[in-house]
Structures are given as structure tokens and as C-alpha cells.
Amino acid sequence: MTFANSTTEERPDLRRQPVPGAGEEPSATPGAPAGPPGSSSRDGDGPGDGVPPGDRPVPLGEADTVEDLPAAAPATARRRRRLLIVVVLVVVALVALAVSPLSPFSPFAGDPGDEHARVPVEGRSAPTTVPQATDRKYPEAPVAPAVPVPEVPPTTVAPPPPAPGTEPGAGPAPGTPGAPSAPTPGPIAGAGYQVAYADEFAGGLDGAVWETAPFGGSLPAEVSGGTMTLRTSASNGHAWGHVASTGARNDEGEPSYPFARAWEQGYFEARLRYTDDEWSWPAFWLFSMAKSEAWPGEDCAQLNSEWDIMENGVQNGPGLRPAGDWYFTALHRNTSDNSADDRYCGVEDETRTFSTDFPGVDLSAWHTWGARWTDDQLCTYLDDVEIQCSEPYDSTSQPMHLVFTMQYLSRCDGCPARPPELEMEVDWVRVWQR
């Protein structure tokens, strides 16, 4: 984070300049161009002014008053008076410049600083380690320990309110590639990215793109009023709400997902909100297309890569980091598939995680969550403001599809009873590539 440095400039010496007529040669007018060698800055008073030395009038400094000058020198007296007036006006102008609050030399002028600099939220401190996650996104799966990461200072500010015209439901029909109305996100502006996929959920759920998982008992996603809604409820046994961009599954042959939408690298963003409750566990993530295709088996040609762009609430098992206040993200090298030894293709998972709180910001309200994936970095954003970046794993470089989930935590110490329902609303989702 860069703060604008204050600078201090010396004020010019505004002490009164010598006044012609006090026995000294008057100083050159500030800012006046220097004449050629042998010339004077005063009109008609020096070599080269056209007045023979023998006819030059008595200088003003040698007479008590203008009236004491010889009668032969009225023109010279007038010139000296004009010069005196010019010097006085210059001095007055310099004094006015010095005291003006708009002047860079004024002691009353403030340092405007950088109005675009991001200011850290007061009281924010970066965690030194990331506590162990309390849950996994897969129903009834054992908890995997989180790996401590180096301290990374959070850099974010409270996001601005939604701009007029960005209310839920506005935009083109679902699944429209290259939506012309989509503004380029700030983090990739001018970098040559184009919309590769966009769904504004204005005309219903596109079944050719969005499908619930074939496991976990999810309720189907619903579209109404221009938003896609995922629900998890007590009436459905608290099963997760899940939807992914795999398209419908084909159980009669290969490929299992012939209409899947999956991407490798790019910028991924979604505008969403979720229930502000201590039991809430919302997530917006990318998952290995190879693993989804191989389910329920394993395709060990590639490890099971996963990137949790936003997985808030996952650390709230102890009841201290609710989804409305704390942000969490994780990059997995080889996510478990809940096999007997909890290792996909017999390889232990590794994670790079980051967590921070956002004092004064309701993370459960409408926000745009973004993620930029390049050769050497994976960065996450809240309303176009960078949160953190991490390095990819050797398994990260593979096509991954979009996933949205909404779940109850398996435990929440000291929390009230679980509410009868939790939900996530998605206003739109976009994928950018170059």
C-alpha cells in the first residue's frame, strides 16, 4: 500500500527589497529577462541606453527629493518614479502569492496527498498464522489441517455502495458470451481481456450450463427476479446448496460433461450476497474439470486442483470468525475426494490459505468478488480492490469450472440454534480471458 509523501517547500524570502532612491542600485525586477552583457535592467540608466555619459542626470540616490533634481532631468525622474511603482507592485504580488492558500509556497497550503491511495482500515492487523479450518465443502468429510502461511498484510478498504443501474437482474440473457454491457474490471483494465462467458440470470436458469452436483443431495438452484438463488434448509436435512458450470451430466458414455464450461487462467468475478448468520458457509470457487469428469473414479493424470476464491465462515467452528466479518481463501494442490485414505490418487493435499477480518464491512451484503489467475499469481479482490495474492502449485495449470455453494457449518460453538434456511443470491457471473 502506498501513501502519498508529504513534502515541504521553503517559502521565498519576502523581506522588503531595497527601494531605489535609498543610495543603492535597485535590484532587477523578479522574473525579468537578463539583458546582454554591458546593459542594465533599468530603462535608460546604463551603458547602451542611448544617453551620453556626460549628459546623464543626477541619480535619485544623490538628491534628497525629486524636486532637488536638476531641471534638466524631468524625464529621468519620471522614469525612476515608474520604476519605483513597478518594484512596489512586484513586491505586493509576491506577498499575495506567499499568503495565498492556493500557492505552493504558502504556509497555509495543505498537502493534498494521493486521493487514489488505498488507506488501511484502522485497527486492522494481518494474521501471523491461519487457524485450522473447521469444515470442508464436501458433506460429512473429515477436517484437513490448514497450513500456516507467511504474514501478508491485508490491503483493503470499505467497498463503495453499488452504482446506480447495477441492481440485481439487469443485463443480457443467461449464458451470453461477451456481454457488451459488462464494464472491464479495474484490476484488468487495459490488459487486453475480453468477456469469455457471462450470465446475468435475466431469463431463467440456463440448464445447458448450470447443474447441481450428482452427490450431496443439493436442492436445485432457482432463478427469479434476475438472480440465481441457492438454498440449504432444515427441511432438506441441511444438505448443501450447490451449482456448477459443468452442464448436465451424461451417464451413458464419455464425456460425462459434454457441455461443461471450464477455463484455464483469466479473471473470474461474481456479484452476490448471502445470509448473515453465524452458521453460514458460502463459497465461490473453481474446481478441476478432470476430477469432475472422472467422478466417482479418479483420473491420476492430473491432481485435483481447487481454488476457493471466497469461502467465508469456514473458520467459524469456534464461533469467532463469522462469514459476515471474516474473509477466507485457499488454493489446494490436490483436494481430497473423500476416499478411504482421504488422499486423491494417494497424494496428500497441500494448501495456501489466507484469512483476514474486515472491520465495519458487511461481507454478506452485495459485493463483487473477483479472482485473477495468471502464470505466476492467483490474486483475489473485493469490489476491484486487491485482498491478497499467492503462487500457483504445479497442479494449478489445468481447466477448472465455476462452483457456487451454500452450507451450514457442522459446528458453531456458542452460537444460537441453526436457522431453518440459509441462502446465497448471485446477481451475475463473468469470465474474462485474453
Image (cartoon, helix red, strand yellow):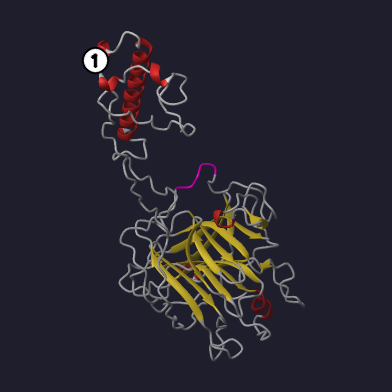
Q: Residue 304's x, y, as percent?
A: 61, 80
Q: Which residues are magenta?
A: 161-165
Q: Residue 42's x, y, as percent?
A: 40, 25
Q: Measuring 65% from the left and 76% from the top, which residue is drawn there?
A: 292
Q: Quadrant of residue 78?
A: top left
Q: Residue 241's x, y, as percent?
A: 53, 67
Q: Residue 57's x, y, as percent?
A: 35, 16
Q: How many marks?
A: 1
The main secondary structure of the magenta stretch is loop
Q: Quadrant of the C terminus?
A: bottom right
Q: Residue furthest top?
A: 71
Magenta region includes residue 280: no
Q: Residue furthest front?
A: 54
Q: Quadrant of the N terminus?
A: bottom left
Q: Measuring 66% from the left and 86% from the top, which residue is drawn there?
A: 300
Q: Measuring 55% from the left and 84% from the top, which residue is drawn there?
A: 338
Q: Residue furthest right?
A: 253
Per the image, the residue denoted by label 1 is 65
Q: Secondary structure at mark 1?
A: loop
| Depth check, front residue: 198 or 77 | 77
Query: Which amino acid is tagged 1?
Result: Thr
